[in-house]
Amino acid sequence: MNLAEAACRLAVLFPKHEIYGFTAQVRRAAASIPANIAEGYGRDSRGAYVQFLRIAQGSVKELETHLLLAVRIDLVPHAAIEAVMAQCETVGKMLRGLIRSLDDDS
């Protein structure tokens, strides 16, 4: 949730003409991360949970990609995304560890 919040706050810095472009994409990818974790946790099986964790992991990579591209096309300076990118790395590692743990326990 902290990562999603930080990414949504960062998206406010994007130019107004990007509200339906990059801004929306960043917010959607960011919100997808905790939503998929929660949805998977609510499922009845470990396999479904792991699958949703993998989808969340993909959303982390999608968010990273949108942010890096936003820098490359000069929507925001690189310094603006550094903290969110660091959170992406942390959340990605946590997801990988949880997935590995759940896979090892099966």
Image (cartoon, rainbow, N blue to C red):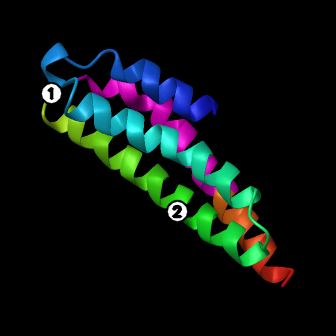
Give how far across and how far down residue 40 sits, in percent. 68, 60
Q: Which residues are magenta?
A: 76-94
Label number found at residue 74: 1
Q: Quadrant of the N terminus?
A: top right
Left or right position of 102 against 72: right
Q: Quadrant of residue 66?
A: top left
Q: What secondary structure is found at the residue carrying circle 2? A: helix
Q: What secondary structure is found at the residue carrying circle 1? A: loop
| Residue at 78%, 74% in the rendered image | 45
Left or right position of 10 against 46: left
Q: Nearer the viewer, residue 60 or 16?
A: 16
Sequence-first tag of 2 and 1: 2
Circle 1: residue type: Asp
Left or right position of 84 against 79: right
Q: Residue under circle 2?
A: 55
Q: Is residue 82 magenta?
A: yes
- Residue 104 appears in the rendering: yes
- The vertical placement of 31 against 61, above or below, is above
Give how far across and how far down residue 10 sits, in percent. 40, 21
Question: Rounded to the nearest whole Å, what is the CA distance between mark 2 and mark 1?
Answer: 29 Å
Q: Nearer the viewer, residue 98 or 82?
A: 98
Left or right position of 23 against 29: left
